[in-house]
Image: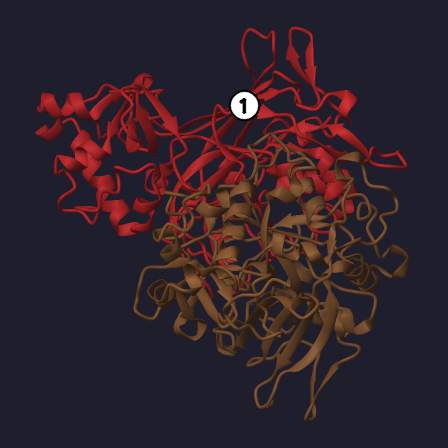
Chain colours: A red, B brown
């Protein structure tokens, strides 16, 4: 097994097999730059680049790591990503002297993670959210339209998706203000206005694409995975009461665009190769442009934890897996471009809520509590149907290797009370 | 009446009363910069700025006009826009000597429009499309759900909108590749794949917002118009067959994101003040956050023209007006932020298809031909239900003043045949 000269705990999310990219500032107020996580450290790629370690790779002389976002690096494409990754992996390996035995370079390039501040890793041009879990779509459909009409007739033929809001994608840790808006309770004659009473999370995985395609020139299924740079955890916060009232006929809008949180470390697709698995059987067979030849799913264990105010620790409320997804990342990416839409370096695509077959593998409160019929017990006498002010929701996930984990860290956010008081309504 | 020392035809879209902003390159390959249109000329604001003409305004020393987009200028806010506009208006007026009598400055700053190339005026962060014409929503609803269920029950309470795709917003003149994708003909048992057979345009008006609001801090109706920098014509190209199959339950996606065209000149909201009118009566009364105190509609005459291959000239197929819109720009802007969503400088919001009460005032082919039941006669034996390859669709619009027009120029695009041949399907 590949090992680093840096000690990494077997439970750490960041062994040498992972090497996720992030953007960070050092406490000495250096400008934002790009690093990779290794154990409890971050390797400053701007420093390593300046020391000439990338001089045989396609990034040489381009200064792509001394930047406040990953976009320039992502834009260089798959070959550059591969060469940089193998260079870093070699540099950090136990039997490579370049960094290991250079005390000055090590001191400059390896910084304890507790001394850095993580920033948004990517400048997101457009954000698209899919609806690619069959269990999620079926559960939601059953609740709203009955079991017989659970899946819309298009669902098994194409990955349903919609344009999300890029401006309100925020970094893990950002506090989330409870949204205010219109809703219409089931038996009300008129809509009401006020803070959302049905605030929910959505456990998702997102991926950053690049270099992208030109307008009118679709990506083929054979090219699709070379367009996937890396993955993050996504919490697509949702206000179900606002959503139910606004979404017809053009889809979710303000019920989603008040905030979407992402985890700070972007896990390269290459790090997930050992965890590639077959996805669910697709029946009916998809149209040719969606037929993927290789295994398209990934075995990523995922959990959601909720901690209310006054609770001494968070309670796990969901255990699920990315491998349950009916439509693969490649299929979603290809479908996005088939009519000609262009993707740009750093665009974010996300899977939609990830739900599995078990009751506790459902990735949002709407499903976990079955629209409120079945509250979650958090212990200490606390129950939840929807998120309350002060609640902290954390999603984490990892691939379990033999003696190591390729992990995503976490995406977390705490709910702040709404700004509007009852008097203003 | 205010007059410029530059001769401007009474039918010109660009008198001194207008002064729309655009981004352009000169044929001498200078870097992109910002100008305003005046008659057949463009005034190079980077040159005028360097000459010190803005030294008493908030843009002084900021270099906001020597840029490839309007974003930095838009970000300075309403007071800066006002002072710059009045400075330019004075500079170009017949009785002001500064520019009029400075031959060297005039030669450098005033360039015939035929010698420049117009570029995308704004770097668009997010694009949002609304559905704010009651006639449009009613017509579409009648076609798909019958007259009794024409308007969804939320429509009269809030401006329905959805997140669009920013990456595929293109400048007028860009040729539009016919999109390819999935659709399901009414009596087919399975979806089919191929070029869209129901390609449509949508006549819309869009506006660029700025400086915007912070996440979680909504814009109020009183502040809303100070957040509207200026307006453009928008053609939100639509593939109706792809749309009908994909849109449930999350809204339009690939049927829209293959292209959206905008006109190059951004008409300041200030130039439209003389044409402010009352919009339609709103019944029921909107919720307080949407109640606008001033007149929120604008009398902008709008036309769409279609020219097929082999036609000697374009034929007008629609005559409508922006004043028909049920929801005002201010209301749409406020609603967008009410749940906390942040708008950024240069975000594009658009009205949705603008339709009026008359048959020929409907702003898309779906309505004009009533889903194909009533083809449009283009003369010379040509008819249209949907757009054909080679068709050129042009939208134009203006406000008619007493002896002058405040115009938008045009947004135009020609349909290219699809890339996919029948063999590939």
Please state if A70 lies on the left or on the right of B152 as rendered: left
Q: Residue at x 38, y 55 (%)?
A: B46
Q: Toward the viewer: B207 or B338?
A: B207
Q: In which quarter of the image is the C terminus of chain A?
A: top right
Q: Toward the viewer: B352 or A354?
A: B352
Image position, residue A174 (x, y; %): 50, 25
Q: In which quarter of the image is the N terminus of chain A?
A: top left
Q: Residue at x 29, y 23 (%)?
A: A29
Image position, residue A177 (x, y; %): 61, 25
Q: Residue at x 69, y 7 (%)?
A: A381
Q: Toward the viewer: B154 or A21?
A: B154
Task: State the SS at label 1.
Answer: loop
Please state if A379 lies on the left or on the right of A338 as rendered: right
In the figure, B387 relative to A68: above or below? below
Q: Mark 1 points at which residue?
A: A175
For label 1, the crowd category at 10 Å Cα-Cα, with few meaning under 14, some 14 to 19 and many 20 or more, is some
Please state if A182 lies on the left or on the right of B272 as rendered: right
Q: Mark 1 lies on which chain?
A: A
Q: Which residue is drawn at 52% across and 61% down?
A: B93
Is residue A72 visible in the rendered image? The answer is yes
Please state if B264 lies on the left or on the right of B51 as rendered: right
Residue sitting at the far bottom = B380
Image position, residue A350 (x, y; %): 51, 42
In the figure, B257 relative to A414: above or below? below
Is residue B344 visible in the rendered image? The answer is no
Image position, residue A377 (x, y; %): 67, 15
Tally the marks.
Answer: 1
Picture quadrant of residue A21: top left
């Amino acid at each position: 097994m590949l090992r680093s000269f840096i000690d990494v705990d077997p439970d750490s999310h960041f062994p040498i097999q992972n090497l996720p990219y992030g953007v960070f500032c050092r406490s000495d107020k250096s400008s934002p730059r790009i690093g990779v996580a290794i154990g409890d450290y971050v390797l400053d790629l701007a420093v390593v680049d300046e020391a000439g370690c990338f001089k045989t790779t396609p990034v040489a002389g381009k200064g792509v790591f001394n930047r406040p976002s990953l976009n320039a690096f992502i834009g260089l494409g798959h070959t550059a990503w591969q060469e940089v990754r193998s260079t870093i992996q070699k540099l950090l390996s136990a039997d490579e002297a370049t960094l290991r035995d250079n005390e000055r370079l090590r001191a400059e390039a390896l910084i304890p993670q507790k001394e850095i501040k993580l920033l948004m890793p990517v400048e997101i041009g457009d954000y698209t959210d899919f609806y690619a879990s069959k269990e999620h779509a079926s559960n939601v459909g059953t609740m709203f339209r009955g079991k017989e009409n659970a899946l819309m007739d298009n669902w098994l033929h194409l990955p349903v998706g919609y344009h999300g809001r890029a401006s309100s994608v925020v970094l893990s840790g950002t506090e989330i203000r409870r949204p205010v808006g219109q809703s219409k309770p089931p038996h009300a004659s008129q809509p009401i206005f006020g803070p959302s009473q049905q605030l929910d999370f959505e456990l998702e995985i997102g991926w950053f694409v690049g270099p992208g395609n030109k307008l009118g020139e679709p990506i083929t299924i054979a090219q699709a995975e070379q367009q996937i740079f890396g993955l993050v955890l996504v919490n697509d916060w949702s206000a179900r009461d606002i959503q139910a009232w606004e979404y017809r006929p053009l889809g979710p809008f303000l019920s989603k665009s008040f905030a979407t949180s992402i985890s700070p470390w972007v896990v390269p697709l290459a790090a997930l190769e050992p965890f590639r698995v077959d996805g669910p059987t697709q029946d009916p067979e998809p149209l040719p442009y969606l037929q993927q030849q290789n295994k398209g799913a990934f075995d990523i264990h995922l959990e959601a934890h909720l901690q209310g105010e006054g609770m001494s620790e968070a309670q796990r409320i969901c255990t699920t897996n990315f491998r349950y997804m009916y439509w693969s990342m490649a299929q979603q990416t290809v479908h996005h471009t088939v009519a000609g839409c262009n993707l740009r370096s750093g665009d974010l695509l996300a899977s939609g809520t990830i739900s599995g077959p078990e009751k506790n593998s459902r990735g949002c409160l709407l499903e976990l509590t079955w629209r409120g019929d079945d509250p979650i017990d958090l212990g200490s006498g606390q129950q939840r149907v929807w998120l309350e002010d002060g609640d902290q929701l954390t999603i984490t996930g990892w691939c379990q290797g033999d003696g190591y984990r390729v992990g995503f860290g976490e995406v977390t956010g705490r709910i702040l009370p709404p700004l509007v008081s009852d008097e203003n309504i």
